[in-house]
Image (cartoon, helix red, strand yellow):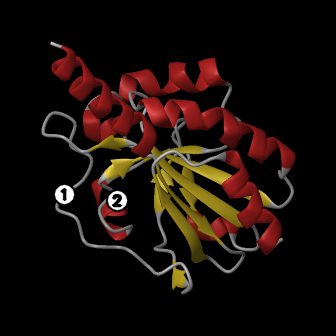
Amino acid sequence: MKKIIFVLFMFISSIAMFGCQKSESREIAGEPEQYKPKKSETTKAPDFTLKTTDGKELKLTDYKGKLVILDFWATWCGPCRRGIPDLIEIQKEYKDDIVIIGISLDRLTGTEKDLIPFMKEFKINYPVVIGTESVTKSYGGIQSIPTSFVLDRKGNVIDYHVGLVPKSTYINVIKKNL
């Protein structure tokens, strides 16, 4: 019995530490296309136009000239939920220099009805768009969430992370690139 509890604890801990993985019942995207740029290289971020939660269109290119953090997430993902308060604080602290764009994958997992109440409860202060399978594929096939990409002022990917990211990690990248 102790072994079973230990194995279960380790499994839950790994999800909390590294992120929510794609599963059969909550499919995030199609087959992965290995998008793993080396952190020393810059890669142009794939452009997109997605609908916001209020039905407007958001174009990534509208944010050229600002640092951008793209956060792929879902309301049901524990690590995503833990990271959102940090993103809210970062958006508030650096509102003139950066924009965070939350890319909700709730539509792809059938939990879209939870999105707007979640945003209100957490008081999200940055744009949230409805992710599509084509966007997840263009960013390499998102296999685990949260997954985030940091873009420079020219729209190049300068940093990326799979799993929960400490606020200090984002702050270091922001300060280095302002």
Contact check, label 1 and label 2, Cβ < 8 Å: yes
Which quarter of the image is occupied by the C terminus?
bottom right
Residue 144, which numbered label? none
- SS state under label 1: loop
Q: Quadrant of residue 15?
A: top left
* In the image, residue 148 above or below residue 88: below
Residue 136, which numbered label? 2
Which residue bears the numbered disc 1? 30
- SS state under label 2: helix
Q: Position of residue 82 (x, y in %)?
A: 56, 31
Residue extending farthest front:
2
Residue extending farthest bottom:
41
Q: Nearer the viewer, residue 88 or 64?
A: 88
Amino acid beneath label 1: Gly
Dot placed on the residue nearer the N-terminal end, 1 or 2? 1
Q: Position of residue 52 (x, y in %)?
A: 53, 43
Q: Position of residue 103 (x, y in %)?
A: 48, 48
Classify mark 1: residues with Cα within 10 Å, few (<14), some (14-19) or many (20+). some
Q: Nearer the viewer, residue 10 or 114?
A: 10
- Separation of disc 1 and disc 2 at Cα? 8 Å
> In the image, what residue occupies the spot 67% across and 33% down?
85
> In the image, what residue occupies the spot 60% across and 51% down?
101
Q: Position of residue 92 (x, y in %)?
A: 82, 42
> In the image, what residue occupies the spot 44% across and 40% down?
17
Which quarter of the image is occupied by the N terminus?
top left
